[in-house]
Amino acid sequence: IKNNIIVKNKKVGFRMEEPLIKDLPDRLCWYIAFTLDKTSKPNWKTLISKIQNNLYDSKTINKFYMEVLSPHGSPSMKLLEDLGRKNKTVSQLVTWLECFVEWNELVSLLNRAKKNEIYPLILRQFPEESVFVGNEITLSVEASGEPPLYFQWFKGEKKLDGETKSVLQISPICPESVGNYICRVWNQFGFVFSKWIKVFDGVHLSNLPTITTHPRSSSFENGGTLRLYSDAVGNPPPMFQWFFNGKCLIGHCGRDLVIERATIDNEGLYQMQASNKYGTVTSLSSNVVCLKSSSNSLLEGRGVPSLTSIDTKVAPSNLPSQKVALLIGNGEYYQEEKLGKLVHPINDVHEIAETLTTIGFKVVSLVNLDLFAMKRAIDFFYEQLDSGTYGLFYFAGHGFEVNNEVYLMPVDATENFSVDENIPISRILRTLAIKHAKLSVLLIDCCRSKPEYNQPCISNPLPKLLDTTSDSMLPHTIQDKNVIIGFGCCSQSRVMESPVMNNGFYAKYLKEYIIKPIKVDDMLYEVARCIDSSNIIDPSSGKKQVMYRHSTVVEELKLTDEVLPSRFQTRLSNLWELAHIAPESPITILQNNSVTIKLSFTAEFSNVLLIHSVVENHNINEYCDVKFILPHKIGGAPVKIARICNLGSVLEFVRISNLERLEGDISIHLNVTYESFGVTKQYLTSYSLKEKPLYAKVA
């Protein structure tokens, strides 16, 4: 680990039952070497005398001794490195050191190192993931390891000067307090980072505008009236502004968009933007088509688009008929301790999804999928593709490469790295060749190194069908034009992460260049150039991270190209769009003379639903407490509840994740306690969603 960069798939501590000397961290080896070098007797030569089988002759010992002539040279370090190459174990080293009472401290240190007791370890942190701004903020970590332990707090990538204790207190609160915080803990043998702690402004979060109704894709007759509708809520109530193909529509500042005598020039993408003093949110894009014949039904702005069984007809233009994207971010692996902890996949997917939405993509973003769910999601993505579609697939998580095949790892993958437990890239490429999409983009942010197996071999490995001297089998399997692939690294290399950054390096530059109106080949070139100029080094191999890309694109295609919608919309494409639209909100569930309680629904990801309560006190100084009563799981979908204090009221937020595992309906029960004119009152109320939300409709 160097320069705050960690490696995806990096394992912490010893993974073998009998650790080897070469598994010891460099800092511990240097500490042992310094101890052996600084004493006249016993010293490293004395240690050699206790090694069995006369392992070293006088010539080799003399080579070790000559290390003193090199800058920072250490005979003892040279000896330890050689013992490591000979696969000697830590237990053997302990046995040799135990022959001398002077080295009892080293013996004790190594015995504790075998139990991972000397390295810094975060025992617990408060809060676990997020905290909401109140009068003051207290963040803390509790760590173990060989003393002394040192602490350093960061906000984003910026080091907080003077914040070198286990507790970080921020007071008084100001808008600049909002952000991402992390603590680095270290001692002489290594360092470790806490989890990111997100600090939200509770008032800002509850009052930020929320889109309650997204505009629906629709059509209008040539010369007729174009109607769209979208709505949002917030405190204070938001102002509205409509956009057409990314440009502001002057004068259209209401929930309803009405354009009289609309023509084919009014075809395109429409979005509504809602703003108040706390921020701005933008609706999903609505595809609007001009119908030349009056025989086609006119769909009003609030209606559901008409469907047809014709799946293959596309707009007769060089522009795409639709742009769809599937984003998968796997960050919470079941065997995280063995596979390695990842920092960025979830946040990378969230921010790339927002970026793609702004340029007209219909995005389905999914996080923490198991093997079955990944296969289902990819198959659903395939069904959206036709000869008029731009299709983009992005994956962030663990991965590996064996026999010139790259595998994407679901969250239930094991350390066996079995091909049966993972998704091969060739499976995706073969289907793309069949679909002949107008443009196919694969962006893969995972390692491509060969795994270190704990098992003798991989089960059912793929045969080596191709020339193994090539970088990968991938280019040879592309049988169609207008396919472009971008990997975060080259073959047999690894992708780096930095815990002090909000995004991984690959995602950071993708966000920047995806929205630029340049050819897709040029877009990936710019991303590759930025990664190269960042000089990202893999500390385990010394290799520089270099992005790998391959393209068969033969047309001037841009991800920012406008969409010329097909006059036919399929049932599947309609489902794809609905998979990221949250249930209509706010919903009033309790209203009387003292208080009004509403529920608001937001899509954090396509398979993660956020529910929060909105309290309107008719007597502003009176107390109100809203508690959600929900099980820990609904079917297989985990449920988490967080609480905040806001203007005298205690509010709760519910996060229902992995909606693809949802079984049955979501019934929300609330316990509402409030004080009215000195009298405490309590109500039990409930609300059931009328249908499965978001991606659960599809899964």
Image (cartoon, rainbow, N blue to C red):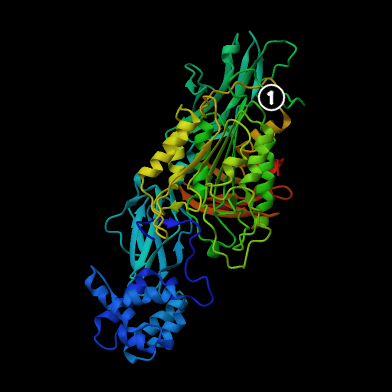
Q: Position of residue 622 (x, y in %)?
A: 49, 48
Is 152 situated above or below 390? below
Q: Is 546 on the left-hand or right-hand side of 370?
A: left
The quadrant in which residue 143 appears is bottom left
Judge whether residue 541 can be spotted in this image: yes
Q: Residue furthest right?
A: 309
The quadrant of the rendering that contains the C terminus is top right
The type of residue carrying mark 1 is Gly
The reply, left or right, for residue 255 in relation to residue 371 is left
Q: With 58 as the anchor, is 693 left or right in this view?
A: right
Q: Could you say where residue 332 lies in the image, as x and y percent from the top left?
A: 56, 56
Circle 1: element type: loop
Instruction: Identify the residue at image location x=39%, y=47%.
Output: 178
Query: Which residue is more in the foreground, 291 or 559?
Result: 559
Residue at the spot of label 1: 303
Please give the name of the residue rendered at 72% of the width and 10% of the height, measured from the top-left corner: 294
Q: Quadrant of the N terminus?
A: bottom left
Q: Is residue 597 visible?
A: no
Question: Residue 271 occupies which quadrant of the picture?
Answer: top right
Q: Is residue 561 above or below residue 139?
A: above
Is 246 positioned to the left or the right of 695 in the image?
left
Query: Height in image: 386 above or below 592?
Result: above
